[in-house]
Amino acid sequence: MSSDVQPDPVHEDVLVDVLTRTGESFRGDPAAAMAGVLDRGRRLRRRRTLTAVAGSVTALAVVGVAGGFVSSLGADRGAVTAASAATGSAGSGGIGPAAPAASGAPVTPAQLVAALQGLLPGTQVTDTTVGSANPDDPEVFAGARLDDGHGAAAVSISLRRFTDAPDQGDIACPDPVYVPNDGCVAEQLADGSKLLLLKGYEYPDKRVLTKSWRAVLTTTDGRRVAFTEWNAAQEKDAPVSRVDPPLDLDRLKALVTDSAWVSLFDRIPKPTNGGWQPGSAATPAGRTVPGWQAMVGTAKGLLPAGLSPADAAGGGPGFAHFTVDDGKGAGLVEINVADWSGTAPSGPKGGSAEARFANATVRADGTRVLVDRDADGDGKSAAGMVRWSVEALLTDGTRVAVSAIGGPNPREATRSAPALTVEQLTALATSPQWRIGGAA
């Protein structure tokens, strides 16, 4: 697998909600994964609130663009290439180094839409919504409705300066077990920038066939350009208006790598914390979480007799998923391993590891255990899906979260109960073999 996707099994209800909005991704460390997911969810909710307050106006009112355009978005890539040439596109080399931040007046969402309009000649832009994020989270966001004569399509564009390391969901293809898609490309460009192109869906379970195609460019100096398009006039609650979104992957790449964004980034202030720099978040020596292959090997020796991980396993650093079959059908098992020693990261519900496990059962050896039984029928995943989870904090500060669900993936409820009992999950989660800190 090429992905670092790692959902936290104890709180996937929150995670799935975010996935349906972004098609995206997760952080490398399971603890950081949930923090990143929650942070992204808050940002998305803030954007929707702001755009709702701003209301909808026509493109002429917001952008001040008049006159016609000569080329059709449905034509070949020359339309975008021509616009790029006029502004000196960096093309596949990325958007290039930024000038010192915040030179001149702050960039506005209307200017963001104007730049987008300039890169999409021949396309009508209407019903524009705009909003800026919190000043402590330097980002400018705008949404619009495009029509190239083949059906209306909702789009969004955002420019952001990182306050911390980029989300894995912005630089790595998602694991198809959790995020089904029709194609994904993740590549590093000549200047070190990373480009992600994803043909996904608004809802991972495809209960509505609204497609969500996304392009994200992240640069080595902490900038991100993200563009998303749908094959419907709205992101949600609108019928499909066309077979596919307007731009194919080549045009998405040309759009987010165009140098038109550079001058706008120059006027986005750097984060109050100074911004993220590559290599600024070092992993403490001796506390590196295992890779998914090693985790599957460990799990194989801890599973009940007669059960073994299926070949279709995957994951990323600190996360592994696989299915087991007890003769009643395949059931998905997920394992997260994270370092919560020392200055503990925030738990999924906020606060320290100590607070997270405050009400846990404490075993004789000091291991703390939390058990959660959940029958998920809220519509965010397959109705009636049963999930059992056990979370353990080992005495060396290793946090282990193990879950099993009643189906081969989060979208198919094929069993009345998971393949592993809560007792078996507890034995798996509390094994000292997961310790990443060595001997006590």
Image: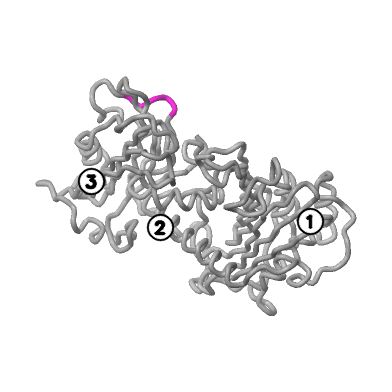
**Element type at marker 2?**
helix
Q: Are marks 1 and 3 in contact (CB under 8 Å)?
A: no
Say few, some or many: other residues with alpha carbon within 10 Å of mark 1 (under 14 / 14 to 19 / 20 or more). many
**Element type at marker 1?**
loop
| Quarter-of-image position of residue 310 | top left
Discs 3/2, front: 3
Residue 357 placement (x, y as % from top left):
22, 55
Q: Identify the residue under disc 2.
A: 35
**Of pointers 2 and 1, the one earlier in the residue sequence:** 2
Residue that sits furthest to the left in the current view: 364
Q: Looking at the image, which is closer to me, 315 or 324?
A: 324
**Of pointers 3 and 2, the one earlier in the residue sequence:** 2
Say few, some or many: other residues with alpha carbon within 10 Å of mark 3 (under 14 / 14 to 19 / 20 or more). many
Q: Left or right: 206 with respect to 352? A: right
Q: Identify the residue under disc 1.
A: 120
- Identified by mark 3, the residue type is Val
- Identified by mark 2, the residue type is Ala
Q: Which residues are magenta?
A: 308-312
Q: Left or right: 398 with respect to 48? A: left
- Identified by mark 1, the residue type is Leu
Residue at 75% over, 62% down:
260
**Element type at marker 3?**
strand
For residue 181: magenta?
no
Residue 370 placement (x, y as % from top left):
22, 49
Discs 2/1, front: 1
Q: Main secondary structure of the magenta part?
A: loop
Q: Identify the residue under disc 3.
A: 371
Residue 387 placement (x, y as % from top left):
32, 40
**Of pointers 1 and 3, the one earlier in the residue sequence:** 1
Q: Looking at the image, which is closer to me, 246 or 348?
A: 246
